[in-house]
Image (cartoon, coloured by chain):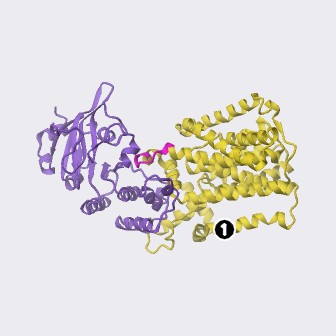
Chain colours: A purple, B yellow
Amino acid sequence: MSETTDAVPGASSDGAVLRTDGVTKRFGGLTAVDDVDVEVSQGEIVGLIGPNGAGKSTLFNCITGTLSADEGHVYLQGRDVTGWPEHKIARAGLGRMFQETRIFGNMTVRKNLLLAAQEGGASVGNLLRTPDEDLVHRTDELLDRVDLGGLADTRAGRLSFGQQKLIEFAMELMSEPDLLLMDEPAGGINPSMLENLISYIRTANEREEATIFLVEHNMDFVMEIAERIYVLAHGERIAEGTPEEIRNDQRVLDAYLGRE
Amino acid sequence: MTAAESEGDGLLRTVVPPGQVRRLFRFCDAHGWTLLVVGAVIGALPPLVGLEPGYYMTVISEMFLFTVLALSWDVIGGQTGYPSFGNMAFFGIGAYVTAILVEDFAVGFPVAMVAAGILAVAFAAVIGVVVLRLRGHYFAIATLGVLLAAQQISRNLDVTGGASGKILLEVPTGTVFYYLFFGVMIAEIAVVYYLTNTRFGFILNAIRDDEAKATAMGFNTTYYKTAAWMLAALFTGLAGGGFSLFNTFVDPQTAYNGAWNVELIVMAFLGGSGTVVGPIIGAFGLHTVIEVVETAFVGWQLVLLGVAIIVTVIAFPQGIVGTLREYASTMEYYERGGMAAEGTDDEEVTAGE
């Protein structure tokens, strides 16, 4: 397990968008996440892998504020967001794509994207304004980028699962988060759609629109797209490195094969 | 698409082609404000061209009143997804506040009505903080509890006249009520229609569809739900205020009428909840049918209400407007092979959903 060497609590390393410092979460007698440190720097795509029950989703939930960590701290852009309510952390620049696709099914595709745009915040004036042309134009551009142009006025729940996944991704780009957490983005979508998704994520990352921290079970996907990978097992961080290093790490192989 | 939906679409297709339905919706979306102005002008005409106070004027005024109630319910129940069985509590508060102020404090009718609206909103804010933490069935039962509690409290207070209620002797003419309810209705339609295409409206719809996701996106949903609940209370309270004089008396049974609460929910569902025009169609349609039944088959109106609920929930849970919109949208999606076709002819943000 890596040791954090920051002299000042809460200060981040250069360019770190996310840093967790000794995050621990227990459910009764079970320690689901045990003293975990991770760091994601500006512009990176970082993967988080581990066998079932390793604590990946629990760590995500502690970062987003869905669960409160029993110990440790979460820093977003250097700010200590530990204990903040979920919506406030999201406002602070954290986007999240869920394991099961979560879009607003009874709204049109365009309204889903317009909702995701964060311009103007929650002022009364902004809340009572109808979307301007620039914003509508941006939704169209984003939909075109994920090859869903023309479906803007379709009810989002009518689309296929893969299309809904792309809508959710486009929504996250629309909100321009400092960090995007993706929980199993490859789950349940067909191979050709998966290739598209990889290309869309790469493009967004190259255009400096997205710093990404993702949980994924599909090893080919995560090895192809992530620059660095953290590995969790039994709630502990057992490895960190490039995809190549992780692929050849004996502790990782043991964890996946169930060896202690 | 399920088998039931396919059969439903097939039946609809023999009556009206999807293209025509699409064109109708696009026309309405693009010209919503014009249609509202035209509707307002047409609605204002009848008393000017000979409609006298009497049975027909009363029935039409009641339609306006029920439209206000159904649309108010839909703001919280349809647009935000919180099925309230307690909206009539706001109505009762509005009715009693107006009756007390006019009868006991000699306050002018319009001022009393405004006070009724404000107090209903304040009540909604206080109650909302508690009950809007619940969802689904729990929320529905809690709001029903609020309605019953408000009814019991009114029954036991001196200021509200106890079980006998309050009688109002000096009331305006039927024409005044016609324009009063009509004005409140048009104002509410305009407000709700505008809001459906604002960020606030989108957030309410998002809460309805997936509140956890809306929270994860950074929205403090409690704040928005409470605002929607207060908006519903404002118009329901105003309607209650007008009703107290329109009815010439207020008692706990009439003011906190649980059957009416069900009726206005059915109106919203029948027309299409979560849309602006749905509750309007539902209120006018169902109230017309109930009036006819009440006249021709006295005592059967509640049976009709029960049948209407069953038929609506089973046959078309999205209501008239929702079913037609879904039909048009689905057919467009499948006509295009499940993917978008280039050059869609509707680039405008749809409004009035």
Q: Is residue A229 visible?
A: yes
Percent position (x, y) of residue A119? Answer: 41, 58
| Magenta-span inclusion, residue B218 | yes
**Residue at x 21% of width, y 39% of height:** A37
Residue B34 sits above or below residue B162 on the image: below
Q: Position of residue A120 (x, y in %)?
A: 43, 57
Q: Nearer the viewer, residue B144 or B328?
A: B144
Is A209 magenta? The answer is no
Residue in front for this viewpoint, B302 or A45: A45
* Position above or below: A222 against B22: above
Q: Which residues are magenta?
A: B215-222
Is B38 displayed left or right of A234 in the figure?
right
Q: Residue type at mark 1?
A: Leu
| Quadrant of the drawing holding the C terminus of chain B | bottom right
Q: Is residue B2 visible?
A: no
Q: Position of residue A213 (x, y in %)?
A: 26, 49
Q: Residues within 10 Å of mark 1 (few under 14, many from 20)?
A: some
Callout 1 secondary element = helix
- Image position of A47 with respect to B166: above or below: below
Please state the chain letter of the residue tagged with numbered disc 1 in the rendered image.
B
> Which is nearer the eye, B105 or A61?
B105
Displayed quadrant of residue B93: top right
Q: Position of residue A155 (x, y in %)?
A: 49, 59
| Residue at (60% x, 59% y) in the render | B193
Query: Which residue in the protein does label 1 denote?
Result: B35
